[in-house]
Image (cartoon, rainbow, N blue to C red):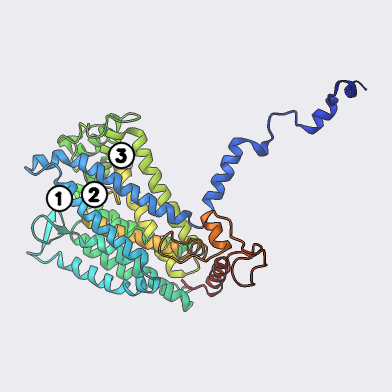
């Protein structure tokens, strides 16, 4: 054959041994990348990393933007340029301690704290209305002065109280199989929520009231409320909200400023329009950190309610999309924790916290974009304000604790061994960790149970397997 004289294979054999196409769909780089992303997304610790990393990035970026957006306001008030940044940094450090404490607390302790936090929040919110104790800020009587330049807003604690207490209440009723009756689903959850809403509305803070209402609906939805019951409560809340808006000229003006492009009569839409100006002048990558023009007295509340507008002006579309992506990742991780747990309290608490943070972010960003009326609520973990930052970071600590407490996540965390301060087993297991081959002295077979048999798995794998199976069988959290 010609192929045998030349030493070459026939063309037919070469085609059969190697595909004619440069690559198969299975080996396509994009397909391999998507497969790796999907596997990483399904890992047990994905929610834990998303919550911890996302909240950390939002807080750090918020500190940077607070420093940038608040300098002019501080100088106009004859204060040091870093005045608001230092207060926010102090609140972030305290909040980090609360986050760490909440992430290490067992679920039973979280449930035990629900009633004391609720009682303390109601007491402080009632104390706000006492003359001489409560103080008014921007027309809302929702603050208590702690002396000097420090104030506290008890309604922010009310959000955390409603999440913990509502989750514990619904979980107890689910254990007793009482949620099939509509009266047990509504009482006392709805009356207590209306009590909190009434105390908040006495001070005129409708933005916080909307967030508490969103938390209530989130808890009812997670509890499996019937559609007619859900629609009934929503209709009552919408009717009350519409009445409160129609009877207040300031709220009617805010409603009229949705999508406004001019200042309006008397400059009623000044803040909304200048927020759009800030976003429009940012472009793709912004004018540069610290180079905002609107924060020089044109944009009110540049470091609090409208810090997202300053972010868009200085960091551009890329910066605002990054913030949105971080909040989206945080919301997805919270939903994942609530959906994968078997503990009713964890499900309701995680869902309540996710509803709280997501709804507040949507209301704030929607107002800056001109899609929603200005509600006067800060951007969670991002805007200036220690009263809002501390309860929110405690709530993030709750999500971290719940994400760590999943059976698969517990097993994955238990498989990790500390690098220092732990005795290492000798022989083959230690040699595998250190990269050295095990020493063989006389060629004898190692004793059974010594941990040095080449065919045996390290002993810790059996221990982790027992832990994971025990966690799955007991269902305890």
Residue 362 location in percent, x, y?
35, 48
In the displayed structure, would residue 84 be above or below residue 411?
A: above
Residue 431 location in percent, x, y?
55, 58
> For the residue labelled by badge 3, is the local secondary structure a helix, a strand or a loop?
loop
Q: Are dots 1 and 2 in contact, CB under 8 Å?
A: yes
Q: Is residue 327 visible?
A: yes
Q: Is residue 210 left or right of residue 456?
A: left
Structural crowding at the residue carrying mark 1, measured as other residues with C-alpha within 10 Å and reported as few (<14), some (14–19) or many (≥20): few
Q: Nearer the viewer, residue 56 or 463?
A: 463
In the displayed structure, would residue 351 be above or below residue 64?
A: below
Structural crowding at the residue carrying mark 3, measured as other residues with C-alpha within 10 Å and reported as few (<14), some (14–19) or many (≥20): some
Q: Which is more N-terminal, label 3 or label 2?
A: 3
Residue 296: image quadrant is top left
Q: Which residue is mark 2?
A: 376
> For the residue labelled by badge 1, is the local secondary structure a helix, a strand or a loop?
loop
Q: Which residue is mark 1?
A: 138
Q: Quadrant of the N terminus?
A: top right
Q: Nearer the viewer, residue 427 or 64?
A: 427
Q: Are dots 1 and 3 in contact, CB under 8 Å?
A: no
Structural crowding at the residue carrying mark 2, measured as other residues with C-alpha within 10 Å and reported as few (<14), some (14–19) or many (≥20): some
Residue positioned most to the front: 442
> For the residue labelled by badge 2, is the local secondary structure a helix, a strand or a loop?
loop
Residue 412 location in percent, x, y?
51, 61
Q: Which residue is mark 3?
A: 370
Tell me the CA gap for discs 2 and 3: 13 Å
Q: Is residue 373 visible?
A: no
Q: Is residue 85 left or right of residue 362?
A: left
Q: Nearer the viewer, residue 247 or 298?
A: 298
Residue positioned most to the right: 1
């Amino acid at each position: 054959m010609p192929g045998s004289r030349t030493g070459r294979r026939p063309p037919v054999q070469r085609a059969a041994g190697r595909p004619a196409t440069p690559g198969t769909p299975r080996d396509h780089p994009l397909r391999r990348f998507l497969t790796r992303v999907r596997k990483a997304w399904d890992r047990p610790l994905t929610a834990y990393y998303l919550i911890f990393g996302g909240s950390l990035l939002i807080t750090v970026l918020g500190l940077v933007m607070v420093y940038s957006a608040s300098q002019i306001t501080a100088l106009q008030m004859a204060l040091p340029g870093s005045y608001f940044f230092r207060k926010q940094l102090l609140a972030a450090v305290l909040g980090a301690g609360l986050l760490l404490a909440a992430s290490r607390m067992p679920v039973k302790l979280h449930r035990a704290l629900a009633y004391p936090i609720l009682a303390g929040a109601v007491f402080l919110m009632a104390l706000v209305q006492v003359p001489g104790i409560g103080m008014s800020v921007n027309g809302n009587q929702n603050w208590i002065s702690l002396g000097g330049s420090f104030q506290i807003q008890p309604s922010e604690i009310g959000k955390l109280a409603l999440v913990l207490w509502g989750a514990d209440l619904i979980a107890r009723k689910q254990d007793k199989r009482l949620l099939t009756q509509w009266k047990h689903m509504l009482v006392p959850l709805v009356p207590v929520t209306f009590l909190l809403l009434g105390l908040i509305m006495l001070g005129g803070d409708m933005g916080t009231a909307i967030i508490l209402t969103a938390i209530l609906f989130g808890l009812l939805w997670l509890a499996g409320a019937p559609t007619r019951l859900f629609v009934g409560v929503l209709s009552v809340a919408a009717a009350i909200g519409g009445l409160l808006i129609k009877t207040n000229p300031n709220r009617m003006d805010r409603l009229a400023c949705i999508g406004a492009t001019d200042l309006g009569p008397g400059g009623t839409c000044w803040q909304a329009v200048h927020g759009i100006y800030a976003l429009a002048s940012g472009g793709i990558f912004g004018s540069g950190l610290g180079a905002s023009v609107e924060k020089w007295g044109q944009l009110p509340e540049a470091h609090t309610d409208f810090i997202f507008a300053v972010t868009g002006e200085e960091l551009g579309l890329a910066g605002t999309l990054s913030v949105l992506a971080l909040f989206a990742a945080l919301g997805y991780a919270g939903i994942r924790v609530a959906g994968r747990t078997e503990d009713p309290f964890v499900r309701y608490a995680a869902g309540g916290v996710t509803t709280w943070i997501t709804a507040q972010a949507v209301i704030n960003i929607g107002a800056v974009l001109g899609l929603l009326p200005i509600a006067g609520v800060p951007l969670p973990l991002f805007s200036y304000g220690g009263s809002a930052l501390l309860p929110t970071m405690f709530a993030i600590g709750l999500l971290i604790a719940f994400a760590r407490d999943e059976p698969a996540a517990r097993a994955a965390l238990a498989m990790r061994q500390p690098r220092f301060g732990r005795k290492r087993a000798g022989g083959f297991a230690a040699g595998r960790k250190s990269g050295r081959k095990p020493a063989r002295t006389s060629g004898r077979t190692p004793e059974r149970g010594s941990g040095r048999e080449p065919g045996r798995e390290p002993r810790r794998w059996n221990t982790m397997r027992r832990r994971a199976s025990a966690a799955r069988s007991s269902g305890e959290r």
